[in-house]
Amino acid sequence: MVTVLRQLDECGRCALMFREFLHTWRLRRLRSTFRAGAEISRFIAKDVRRDIQVLDDSRVDDGYVTARVRTTNVLYVTHNLEAAPEFGAPEILHLDRAWAWGGDSWGGKEPIRLKIPLLTSNALCNALHEQFPRAQLSEEVVNAEHRSWRVTMTVGDKRLEFVWGPLSGFGGINPDVEDENAFAYCDEYLYSLDDAVRFAMLHNGAMA
């Protein structure tokens, strides 16, 4: 019995060492691939190529980098069916979704991809204040390590919230609207400052 227990314990230690080895190997591979200054390309669907320019790799161990992304339907561009796209604005790119494709297997148009824009709470406050000069705006740090934040916009008894984080994304919340999913991160994912202003106008146009 003692021998069996020792063998089981040894097996457990071997499995743990193997998992640690795989984790270390994966991190080294990601650091080598998604290093700052690198430009990486891969076909993610038939005739669809994604190019990634890595701008900042300081959080690669946390699973994301700052990058610019371009997705091209090579077939469409070659046959002049659409213009060659430019790289997008800097964004937070999750490595586990870097090569994700939500469209048809045969290619076609790129569907809307969840993007996390590179934003500061101060930039959002400035954009909202320009459109809603009577609004009271407050900023709050949610997680200092990941530099995530929350902005609350209030006029009278009306309130909206905007949250941003490199792990969860950028979103708008209207506390007055009952959400069917109590665990949802936000009411709507946003992709730019213009989206945030539009969300504020849609949910509280009377603030302007």
Image: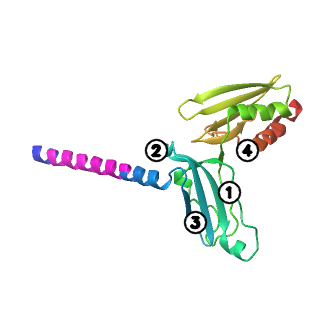
Marks 4 & 3, CB-CB < 8 Å contact: no
Spatial separation of the CA atoms under disc 4 and disc 3: 25 Å
The residue type indicated by label 1 comes to Phe
How far apart marks 4 and 2 lie (CA) works out to 26 Å
- The residue pinned by badge 3 equals 44
Residue furthest out toward the bottom: 79
Asked whether, in this view, residue 106 is left or right of residue 204, the answer is left
Whole-Å distance between the Cαs marked 3 and 1? 17 Å
Query: Residue 10 lies in magenta, yes or no?
Result: yes
Query: Which amino acid, mark 3?
Result: Ile
Classify residue 111 by image quadrant. Answer: bottom right
Label 1, label 2: how far apart the Cα atoms are: 24 Å
In which quarter of the view is residue 101 placed?
Answer: bottom right
- Decide whether the magenta segment is chiefly helix, strand or loop: helix
Q: Name the front one of labels 3 and 1.
A: 1
Question: Closer to the N terminus: mark 1 or mark 4?
Answer: 1
Residue where numbered disc 2 is placed: 61
